[in-house]
Image (spheres, helix red, strand yellow):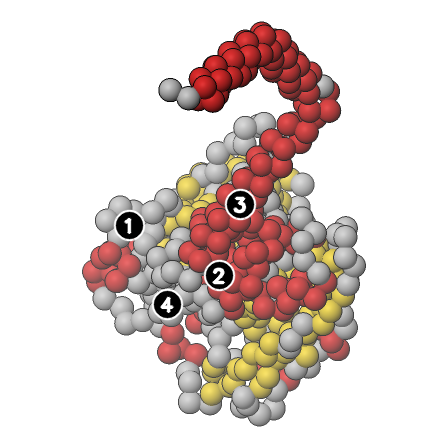
């Protein structure tokens, strides 16, 4: 065996032992250093979590996450509600609920308002837009667009009248935004003021604009047949203007003129409104109409009906009618006093919407209708010259001329109706 090889082996062993010894000598200190550094790192991390700045950052981060989530949820609900507007089975309540999502559904609401499948859906869309208006989420042009599109006029009159009519013909026009509610969450009818005038009636007073009035508007006037020398057609026009009242945006606009045409027909007879008499309907009407004494009011206050300048009836009787009747009524009231000759005019009864079809379709009778007597054309003093208790009954005589003044009267009972006697009290003024 060579000496060099021994020397080399011993040296390697010594080097191994020395390295091992050195490693064993450094290991304890190294482990202590590493454990100390870990403790320092943990302490620093704990110190960082306990700092106020960290708490603020965590809170702000949570707020951002929660707020963003709520916004995303709100946007999702808004898209779902707006998409529902185009579905055919949507309900008015669902349309009105779209207002809670602000302007996101405004274009679709205007589309539904302009092209509604039904009147109820149109009104619901109008109310939803009015809620946005009340919350100041509309510009002035959008507010005016809602008013222009929602503006409606209803004329209450006939289209054709007999040329032979001589009495004044009453006509009514109502206008406004019918979808607005006085107790709703949106714009109220009282938030808008209206002014109007009527042209074509051949009355100078009607052609002047009326005073500004809040709420839905109506105009009542009469025309005189003799003022129109031709049969027509004649054209009436309602001209209105509207302005805001107590709202954020102040504006005033003129609305479209909505006309109404009527004519006089020389071939149309006044008595054409009278129905054909028959015994069966006569018995029904006789059973349905009675004269009834008026009860005292809850505060024991009496009411009075003037007969002339000296005499009055205390708590005058009323004509009570059980509806429906087989025919409409357009009858003048005449008073007859027991042992007093003559009958005395005392007002008019107009009752429309009656007819055989309605009588047959109605399973339960409606509540009785009550009609007051009066005003009474002055009765001669010599007819009733002393106060006291008397018996009274009324006669109802058909008046087709007056029936033409109500556009809903279609068929007037042609017979004279007589009620039973009731006791009344006559007193001096």
Q: Quadrant of the N terminus?
A: top left
| Front: mark 3 or 4 | 3
Q: Earlier in the sequence, mark 2 or mark 3?
A: 3
Which residue in the structure is indicated by mark 1? 287
In 3D space, how far apart are the residues under numbered discs 3 and 1 (Cα atoms)?
70 Å
Local crowd at mark 2 within 10 Å, few (<14), some, or many (≥20)?
Answer: many
In 3D space, how far apart are the residues under numbered discs 4 and 1 (Cα atoms)?
17 Å
- In this picture, is 227 found above or below 358? below
Q: Earlier in the sequence, mark 1 or mark 2?
A: 2
In 3D space, how far apart are the residues under numbered discs 2 and 3 (Cα atoms)?
30 Å
Does residue 43 appear left or right of residue 167 in this picture? right
The residue most toward the bottom is 230
Which residue in the structure is indicated by mark 3? 72
Q: Which mark is residue 122?
A: 2
Q: Earlier in the sequence, mark 3 or mark 4?
A: 3
In 3D space, how far apart are the residues under numbered discs 2 and 4 (Cα atoms)?
37 Å
Q: Earlier in the sequence, mark 3 or mark 1?
A: 3
Secondary structure beneath label 3 = helix
What is the x, y in percent for residue 245? 75, 54
Q: Nearer the viewer, residue 363 or 249?
A: 249
* Circle 3/circle 4 CB separation < 8 Å: no
- In this picture, is 16 found above or below 353? above
Which residue in the structure is indicated by mark 4? 412
Local crowd at mark 1 within 10 Å, few (<14), some, or many (≥20)?
Answer: few
């Amino acid at each position: 065996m060579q000496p060099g090889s021994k020397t080399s082996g011993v040296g390697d062993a010594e080097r191994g032992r020395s390295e091992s010894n050195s490693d064993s000598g450094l290991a304890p200190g190294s482990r202590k250093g590493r454990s100390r550094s870990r403790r320092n790192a943990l302490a620093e991390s704990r110190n960082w979590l306990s700092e106020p700045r960290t708490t603020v950052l965590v809170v702000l981060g949570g707020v951002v996450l929660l707020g963003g989530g709520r916004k995303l949820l709100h946007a999702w609900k808004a898209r779902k509600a707006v998409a529902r507007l185009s579905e055919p089975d949507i309900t008015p309540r669902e349309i009105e609920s779209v207002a809670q999502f602000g302007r996101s559904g405004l274009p679709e609401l205007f589309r539904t308002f302009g092209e509604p499948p039904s009147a109820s859906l149109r009104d619901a869309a109008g109310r939803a837009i009015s809620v946005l208006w009340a919350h100041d989420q509309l510009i002035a042009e959008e507010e005016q667009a809602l008013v222009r599109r929602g503006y409606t006029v209803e004329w209450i009159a006939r289209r054709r009248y007999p040329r032979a009519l001589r009495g004044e013909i009453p006509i009514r026009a109502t206008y406004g935004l019918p979808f607005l509610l006085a107790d709703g969450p949106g714009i109220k009818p009282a938030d808008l003021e209206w002014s109007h005038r009527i042209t074509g009636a051949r009355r100078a007073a009607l052609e002047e604009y009326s005073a500004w009035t809040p709420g839905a508007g109506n105009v009542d006037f009469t025309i005189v047949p003799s003022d129109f020398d031709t049969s027509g057609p004649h054209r009436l026009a309602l001209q209105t203007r509207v302005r805001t009242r107590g709202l954020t945006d102040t504006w005033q606009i003129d609305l479209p003129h909505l006309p109404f045409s009527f004519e006089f027909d020389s071939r149309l007879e006044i008595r054409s409104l009278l129905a054909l008499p028959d015994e069966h309907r006569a018995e029904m009407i006789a059973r349905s109409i009675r004269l009834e004494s008026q009860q005292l009011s809850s505060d024991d206050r009496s009411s009075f009906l003037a007969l002339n300048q000296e005499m009055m009836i205390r708590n005058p009787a009323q004509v009570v009618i059980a509806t429906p009747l087989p025919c409409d009524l357009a009858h003048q009231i005449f008073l007859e006093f027991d042992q007093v000759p003559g009958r005395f005019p005392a007002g008019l009864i107009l009752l429309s919407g009656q007819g055989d079809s309605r009588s047959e379709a109605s399973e339960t009778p409606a509540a009785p209708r009550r009609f007051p007597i009066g005003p009474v054309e002055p009765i001669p003093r010599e007819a009733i010259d002393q106060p006291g208790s008397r018996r009274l009954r009324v006669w109802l005589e058909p008046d087709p001329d007056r029936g033409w003044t109500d556009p809903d009267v279609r068929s007037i009972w042609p017979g004279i109706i007589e009620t039973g006697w009731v006791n009344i009290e006559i007193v001096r003024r």
